[in-house]
Amino acid sequence: MAATSASTLIIPVENQVRELDAKLLLACVAAERGFPVIIGSRAFVHFEIASLPRGIYLAKSMRSLSSSMFRIIRMLGHEIVAWEEEALVHPPADTYYTLRLSPDTIRNVSHVFAWGQENVDLLQHYPQFPENLPVHLTGNPRGDILRPEMRAYFAAEVEHLRNLYGDFILINTNFTDVNPFIPNIGLFIPAKDGDKKSRRGQA
């Protein structure tokens, strides 16, 4: 009996700075285990999706913005698996569900990979989460890239920065909703009493 060939793993990258290193790690591990891998800009992957071999498309989120593209991907015969990129640190559940999950989008997903047990619980308590959708507690490559054995990958860049700046403290933030505040764009606006008020909450 002939061995079944592994499905092609399609890994789109939307934000190079945030995602690429971790997804390259995942691509290398998958390739070592016999999976053909296609990795590249999410926009270009979407442009070429009809020309790609049928395989497994790895999505970074399950938002309403992806609903139409997910339907196209499924119609072309691909399977969609997903993790939730923003689930490690997230707002309260009701806000998170509104911002990050869509019942129409999730309906096209075959499997979900969770950062940890808290992420599993968060997803499964979503009122419109499909009852039979498997959730696998796997961790995430963005966590794996921080493992001690991966430090050599960044060693040359780290040495360059140390030579350039000496000792320094890096405070790495990406809170674009609130910092810096830009009128009519930020998610939160200052209230008169100094508290933060949700712009979405005013709708």
Image (tube, rainbow, N blue to C red):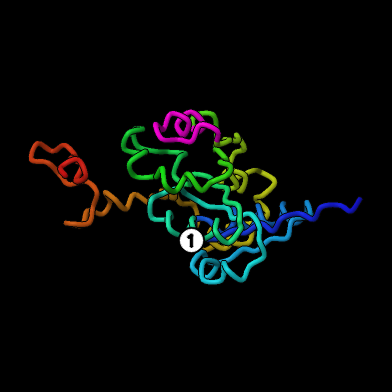
Left or right of 109: which side holds 196? Answer: left
Residue 76, position as x, y percentages in the image: 58, 62
Residue 163, position as x, y percentages in the image: 55, 62
Q: Residue at x 41, y 35 (%)?
A: 128
Frontmost residue, 194 versus 32: 32
Q: Which residue is mark 1?
A: 14
Image quadrant assignment for residue 116: top right
Image quadrant assignment for residue 202: top left
Q: Residue at x 69, y 59 (%)?
A: 8
Query: Could you tell me which quadrant the C terminus lies in?
Result: top left
Q: Residues within 10 Å of mark 1 (few under 14, many from 20)?
A: some
Question: Against 3, is 124 above or below?
Answer: above
Residue numbers of the magenta segment: 119-132
121 falls in the magenta region = yes
Residue type at tag 1:
Glu
Left or right of 118: which side holds 203? Answer: left
Left or right of 147: which side holds 31? Answer: right
Question: Against 89, is 24 above or below?
Answer: below
Q: Secondary structure at mark 1?
A: loop
Frontmost residue, 59 versus 139: 59
Which residue is the extreme one toward the front? 75
Residue 80, position as x, y percentages in the image: 57, 51
Residue 129, position as x, y percentages in the image: 45, 35
Q: Residue at x 70, y 46 (%)?
A: 149
115 falls in the magenta region = no
Which residue is the extreme one toward the right? 1
Q: Residue at x 59, y 55 (%)?
A: 57
Frontmost residue, 171 versus 71: 71
Question: Against 93, is 101 above or below?
Answer: below
Image quadrant assignment for residue 158: bottom right
